[in-house]
Amino acid sequence: MKKLNVAVVGVTYFGQSFARIYAAHPHVDGIVLVDREPNLLKEAVESCKKINSNTRGYTDIRDVLADESIDAVHVCTGIPNHAQLSIEVLNAGKHCACAVPMATSLEDVQKIVQATRASGKNYMMMETMLYGTPFLYARDMLEKGEFGKIQYLRGVHHQPMDHGSWAEEARSYWRGLPPMHYATHAIAPLAAIANSRITEVACFGSGTMSEELVQVYQNPYPVEDALLRFENGLAGEVVRSLFECCIKQSESYNIYGSRKSFMYEYMHEVWERIYDEKKYDRAGYITDVVHYPNRYDLLPEELWPYTIKGCENDPDWREKLDTAPWSMHEASHPHLCHEFITSILENRKSAIDEDFSANVTAAGICAHISAMNGGRVEKIPLF
């Protein structure tokens, strides 16, 4: 099978995580890393060279766009650059992966979809919640019919950007960001399990924020609560907060079925809860607590160590595959990279293609529009 050359744009800790996985992938020939910060770039190149000697660096993305040897580009920069860089990558005739969200305006979503179709290349929004270990378990439950009929879905994403380790980063473009502009972690799992396009949304804003935060995006709401309608008749709820809401970080989703229901909360790395109708008594449903299996078996063996925390260079990593804590974002990164690479080589759309990405991203954008208009129902555009 052909090997690809992949560029990763933005090599902070987050970007370097993906870069090392691409460097180890058996169907990747070379890695090009891009960052405007020379010292950070040098560190990332040296790290990846230990895995793949065919690693080099650029400080300007224009060099990547002009480099005909590069097949695919993964954008790991900040949210304000996602749309423009994705469009430039696609217009340069290269496959594009991009961190979430796809964009923060409906106009930019449309432009990315158009650029993808015009280029004939793949676009993939790298939504971590769709390849996290718990979601892979829920997806298996769905495929086996264990839920019975899906009846309702709920997603929550609380991320207190004004507290703890987030506070320093939140001094930048995050300040006052409309919560639903970055809601794909809560929306995408619901859309994937519903297996249906989101058609409309109604959303209410809640609470008030300081003027300092409001003036950046003219967003007055620290919390936004949206009700989604799917094309197949299902409904779902999404709650999102970023600032001035005192709550621990939480990324969770609930799937309510006629026979079983699934409840997961981010950071609960070992256990999940299944409510089973067959174990019902008058006091309520009985909770099954089961272990999430690490699905390294879905990956090339070269990527297995990247599913567990701190084991990339551990000689005993094989013994820890089923016991060690997951790597970043519920071990989703190697699965995302593998899907992106194999979709290109197999000449098919990625599992999180431009259509799905646009629908999920637009649902959040339209939710904020709804909140700013008193909860008015907004139709999600077809792109």
Image (cartoon, grey):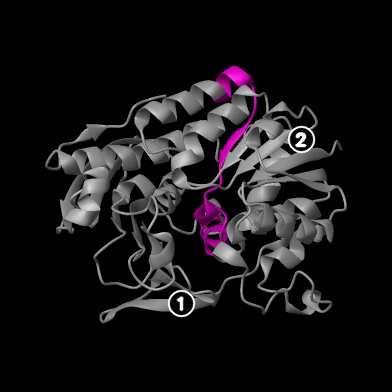
Placement of 250 over or under 224, stated as above or below: below
Element carrying mark 2: helix
Residue type at mark 1: give it.
Asp
Outermost front residue? 38
Outermost bottom residue? 283
Question: Which label was assigned to residue 345?
Answer: 2
Bounds of the magenta segment = 116-139
The image shows residue 130 at horizontal and vertical percentages of 52, 52
Cα distance between the residues tagged 1 and 2 = 40 Å
Drawn side of residue 53 relative to residue 44, left or right: right
The image shows residue 262 at horizontal and vertical percentages of 42, 64
Outermost left residue? 374
In the image, what residue occupies the spot 56% across and 21% down?
117
Mark 1 neighbour class, 10 Å CA radius: few under 14, some 14 to 19, many 20 or more: few
Indicate which label's residue lies in the foreground, 1 or 2: 2
Residue 97 on the magenta segment? no
Q: In which quarter of the image is residue 74?
A: top right
Drawn side of residue 291 relative to residue 281, left or right: right
Residue 124 on the magenta segment? yes
In the image, what residue occupies the spot 26% across and 72% down?
246
Question: Which label was assigned to residue 288?
Answer: 1
- Looking at the rendered image, the quarter that the C terminus falls into is top left
In the image, what residue occupies the spot 24% across and 67% down?
245
- Looking at the rendered image, the quarter that the N terminus falls into is top right
Element carrying mark 1: strand
Mark 2 neighbour class, 10 Å CA radius: few under 14, some 14 to 19, many 20 or more: some
Residue 351 in sight from this viewpoint: no
Residue type at mark 2: give it.
Leu
